[in-house]
Amino acid sequence: MNDYLYMIFKSMTHVLTAERAARKSGISCRMVPIPRNVSTDCGMCISVKAEDGAAFLAMAEQKNLKPERVEKHKGSGPKSRCYSN
Amino acid sequence: MIYLDNASTSWPKPESVVEAVSDYIRNIGASPARGNCTAALDALGVVLDCREAVASFFGGGNPLNVIFTHNVTWAINTVLHGMLKNGDKVVSSSMEHNAVTRPLTALSEKGVEVVYSPCDRQGHLDLGAFERNTDGAKLAVLNHGSNVTGTVQDVAAISKICRSRGTIFMLDVAQSAGIVPVNFTQGADIIAFTGHKGLMGVPGTGGMVFADRFNPDQIQSLAQGGTGSLSEESRQPDFLPDRFEAGTMNGPGLAGLLAGIEYLNSIGLQEIYRRKMKVAGMLARGIEEIKGATVHRPSSGKLWTAVVSFTLADSCTASIADYLSREHNICCRHGFHCAASAHRTIGTFPGGTVRLSPGLFTTVNDIEMALKAVRMYCE
């Protein structure tokens, strides 16, 4: 099971902007609903493999898209009861 | 795609709505109430037709009492910010959307007394508490149908209380219009509506309708600007609807809203309710049969806006929504649906719910596919 990082942004617009920027930079990531045990915000965040985390954050810093928070979690399948379990 | 997010916005739209928007853009084009060319008059005619359709739909009299805004949130804000000032009291409920609670919070920081009346775990207003809380209130603002549970409030009883206290009553019908009957005979003074949900119009449309007995001079306009009338004066016109309609109107959107209302009228509200109850009831019952599942809705026999909000024991609502979207291409909402207070009321805070909201075009097959997907998630 891989380790992942959740990149939490302040709005959906920031999430999508960062996801597009990551794709353009060749960084693999996926937008997922923010798990309720991470935040009660109803929006989405970006899930990035831990090994790509540094590249994502460097890209985000450069584009002035720094996430508000970064949360570690264990990767799991789409049917997980909660991503971090 | 299986679209089950009609409580956010209805989709698909009737073909007549698509055609009306397209026709306006292709063949009318001009700005309503701006200029004297045929196209501008045609544009104004479409907007007036839409006013008449909205007035008639809500059982109101004067179409000039119909004010169009960007959406229902803007309409609610216009009344709240335009009417309430330091020292005034406003009463609302614990089931409201952020369209109400956020402006009320902003107003409370300016000295307006805001009281939220409690509701039971199905979302029904405690009328006794509401009656007590309404004492001395200038305004009551409540949603008709909950966007979380689909619970429908007893408007006639609420109106009666407001009338006895001399309190103005604004009813937010964003979730109920086009599904259950809403009209001024139930007693509201102001109806705030959206065009793009049950009324089958397009986003960017909505507004408020004043009862003929209501004096709109109590509301200051939030925005001032061009109206195509009294252009020599620097003051905003004080007559309706111009007082509240500064700037270019959304002609294409209102053409679509007009077609949407005409579509609903051609079917009839009773038939629409029957169709929605058929699919929503099937969905709710199917989920309730799943072990560990709870559907948060009013009890059988109560009016309901066909919103199926559910939780699964030990499951994160974000995870369920992600699974339904990614693996089954089902559109739904999860979390609080911009109504955290409603979740505190019904006991689903902080996890929220997954909300599946069927629409006018949802089929039995859509429901079977959605139920299969939820069952697979639980396996």
Image (cartoon, coloured by chain):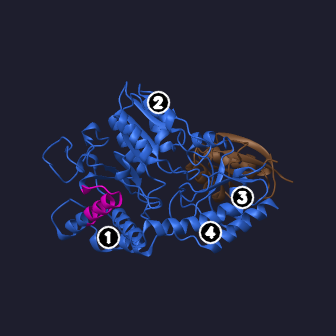
Q: For mark 2, what is the residue? A: B132
| Cα–Cα gap, marks 4 and 3 | 20 Å
- The span from disc 4 to disc 2 (Cα, nearest Å) is 45 Å
Label 2 marks which chain's residue?
A: B
Question: Do marks 3 and 1 share a chain?
Answer: yes
Mark 1 crowd level (few <14, some 14–19, many ≥20, 10 Å Cα):
many
- Report how far apart the C-alphas of labels 1 and 2 lie in the structure: 50 Å
Q: Quadrant of residue A24?
A: bottom right
> Do the residues under discs 1 and 2 have CB atoms within 8 angstroms?
no
Q: Are marks 3 and 2 on the same chain?
A: yes
> SS for tag 3?
helix
| Of the image marks 4 and 3, the number of the one nearer the N terminus | 4
* Residue picked out by circle 1: B24
Residue B2 disc label: 4
* Residue sitting at x 54%, y 42%: B95
Q: CA distance from mark 3 to mark 1?
A: 45 Å
Q: Is residue B86 part of the magenta span, yes or no? A: no
The chain letter corresponding to brown is A
Q: Which residue is mark 3?
A: B288
Secondary structure of residue under mark 2: helix
- Magenta stretch, main secondary structure, is helix
What's under tag 3, amino acid-wise? Glu
Toward the viewer: B49 or A26? B49
Q: Earlier in the sequence, mark 1 or mark 4?
A: 4
